[in-house]
Amino acid sequence: MTSFQSTLGEEGGGIAEELAEGQRAISIAEFFEKNKHMLGFDSGARGLVTAVKEAVDNALDATEEAGIKPDISIEIRESGDYYTLIVEDNGPGITREQIPKVFGKLLYGSRFHAREQSRGQQGIGISAAVLYSQLTSGKPAKITSRTQRSETAQYFELIIDTDTNEPEIQVEEERAPGESELSPTHGTRIEMEMEANMRARQQLHDYVKHTAVVNPHARLVLDEPGLDEPRRYERVEGASLPAETEEIRPHPHGVELGTLIKMLNATESYSVSGFLQEEFTRVGSKTADKVIDRFRDRHFGREMGWSAPREPETDLETAIEDSVANKGAEATATFAERVADTLQSRERTAHSELAGIVDTVADDVEDEFDANFGDTVRENAVEAAWAVLTGDLDSDLYALVDEATSTRKDDATVAGIAERLADKFRDGDPTHRATRATLVDYVDRSADLLVSEEISFGETARENVVEAVWETMRTVPDDVPKVREVAGERDVASELLEAMRETDILAPPTNCLSPITAELVEAGLRKEFDADFYAAATRDAEVHGGDPFIVEAGIAYGGELEDGTVDLLRFANRVPLVYQRGACATTDVVKGIGWRNYGLDQPGGSGMPNGPAVIMIHVASTNVPFTSESKDAIANIPAIEDEIELAIREAARDLKSYLNKRRSMQKRRKKQDVLGKILPEMADKLSEVTDRPRPNIDGALARIMNNVSVEREVDGDSVTLIVENHSDRNEDPEITDIVSVEPADLPEDASVVDLDGEWFVKWEPTVPAGETVELTYTASGDAEFDVDVDGIEAEKLTVNA
Ligand SMILES: Nc1ncnc2c1ncn2[C@@H]1O[C@H](COP(=O)(O)OP(=O)(O)OP(=O)(O)O)[C@@H](O)[C@H]1O
């Protein structure tokens, strides 16, 4: 027992009351003060990287939103035992009223409620950095910001009051441009002192370098202790800002029940149809109708329709006629005949359809015969006709059950199920309405009653029967409840939610997202990694939790890349993820792929592959599901994992064909090397054994290897390049002969360029499989030649010129 436990309640007082005295609300700032690790501030080394990341992400978000190409400077200074971080941007600036809240209040931001891709999401990032800095250095954060419209800059020194999670302003000044430390004419500068160290230098560099890879439109400068010159990450010439994104409404496939109820309570719409069209993306009146029909099915159930007996037809007519009293013989007969004919001409009729038919015919007959067919007459007629329609449910259901079950079910089983199912309909709702759940129950109970040692009626058979009957049933025409009623009844709201999820709805628009695009993913990789091969893929948008997302992947292979475990670069909304690689869905997906299949070594057939390669994954979403507030790792959401896998596989397929080709080329090269050595030896041997001149082996290698060979023949001034294609496909080589004297008698299809006393003669002939093309010109005097052939892999080419 702790001492606390032993003293509590000693006087016989209520323990709950005593505990209550110690209970109080905890401010979010207090909470994170104790749990800084959740926000990525768990050590001095990491704290500095996280603070840089938060400030730079905000600077990029703000500049892009304002349509300004980002110019961001990051400076880290040693200040005795502490470090000072200064981040400055050329963004739109922040107004005087907002500055204290943005930097001095956790959970304050502009992006939390917006369905639009941005780096910031939660409104915690920069204020958490301020909190960390004040906690470790005891110093306030210094902020200077100047908006585009303002002549002066606003300067603040502030800390966060952790008890209240409100900013505590220590200095507030207005500064003229000359007095302000802010270099650009507008933008924001934040200076924070903190306990830190440079042990995470590598992670810091990775973060900045990778940020530069995926933001080619930005210019970044990093200055840190120990550098002679700041590191500069220049903007790619001509790189434009990412496509502007637009906010979207939630998608019907993504909302949870709680959110739906909240939205139902908040909407100004009266009808469910209006609500769906107003509050969700991709819902017009047609889609709303489809959702509402599914909602009806769940809320009211469907109605079973029955076919009118074909023989004897008169039964139906007579029954209707008999139900009508005192309406005149002719009118009654016409009425009965028309209703009966209509029912007879239809495959099936449900109760509400029958009522509709009776109404229409009654209205017509009233007009024609000047008679009055009131409600009672109509009801009686419906009742009489319904009795006939439902007179023989067994045979109707027999046909349905028979078609839905496999041929192995014998007649007695099918009839048994049909009979029992008919009983359920007869005993249930008088208009034969049933929800799907009720129908499942009907079928289950019917099957259970029948099942014995000899007869089995398993899960699949039951499901097939339910499906067949449900498909035959009709959606009812009843009006669905209004928004207020749906909002007030959780079960009804849940029916609506199911209906929304069940209806096919167009994927959400993607103008709220700005993927990097496959082209720029590849360009980014090329810029930063010197490799032999690059591939990239961008998937189409998908939805998770109402938020659309797009996954992109890239692979670089070979060249200067180091062998060993493949390097994985992870990005979310263009932000590099530096920490928690092991907890990230991207890592899990990469490990789960069988890389041997794509030509990479993977010990044990699973886990991170080996090879001189870099794999890059970017998840762009209006709401990236991170595993924690520090936004280091993407959570294991199946829909997102599937897309990550598909994107990687798309890029990996290109890698596979590249590696396959490379391998076959390597084999070919080996074979050529061996042949190149053996052929002359064989020729020598042959000549020795046969005592005849050494056979001419020129061109033999090319023939054996099915290569394209290029040979030169010079006869006086006449020069001929002989191009022989020994392969089984047409080839289009680009052949350039570099000549030291001016060439003449050039054929029409050759082009010539004079470059400082060297003439470049170029042809692009098509050489059909198995044929030879001769390229001739004249070069007088003591000419020197050098030929260059492009458009054919080196391994498939033999040049002897
Ligand atoms: N450099 C800046 N220029 C202009 N506005 C800024 C700047 N930095 C922050 N803001 C504004 O302050 C808000 C709060 O920033 P903060 O970093 O706390 O959260 P966030 O970026 O929205 O989300 P997250 O917690 O996910 O990083 C932002 O949403 C933005 O509106």
Image (cartoon, rainbow, N blue to C red):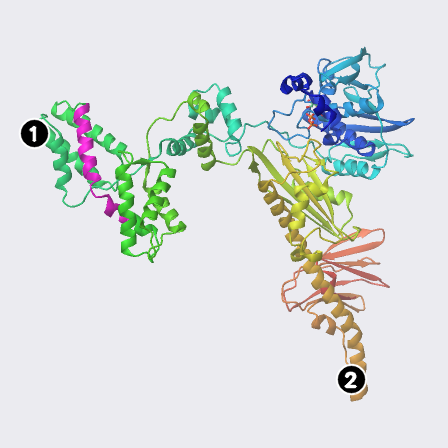
Residue 329, label in figure = 1
Confirm whether the magenta stretch covers residue 387: yes
Placement of 682 over or under 221, stated as above or below: below
Confirm whether the magenta stretch covers residue 327: no
Quarter of the image holding residue 799? Answer: bottom right
Examine the residues drawn in magenta and state their main secondary structure.
helix
The answer to the question of whether label 2 and label 1 lie on touching residues, with beta carbons closer than 8 A, is no
Q: Residues within 10 Å of mark 1 (few under 14, many from 20)?
A: few
Element under label 2? Answer: helix
User: Is residue 252 among what the camera can see?
Assistant: yes
Give residue 507's position: percent from left, percent from top.
52, 36
* Image-based side of 338 in relation to 141, left or right: left
- Quadrant assignment for the C terminus: bottom right
Residue type pointed to by label 1: Ala
Give residue 778's position: percent from left, percent from top.
78, 63
Of the image marks 2 and 1, the number of the one nearer the N terminus = 1
Q: Residue furthest left?
A: 329
Q: Nearer the viewer, residue 507 or 481?
A: 481
Element under label 1? Answer: helix
Give residue 501's position: percent from left, percent from top.
47, 35
Residue 686, label in figure = 2
Q: Residues within 10 Å of mark 2 (few under 14, many from 20)?
A: some
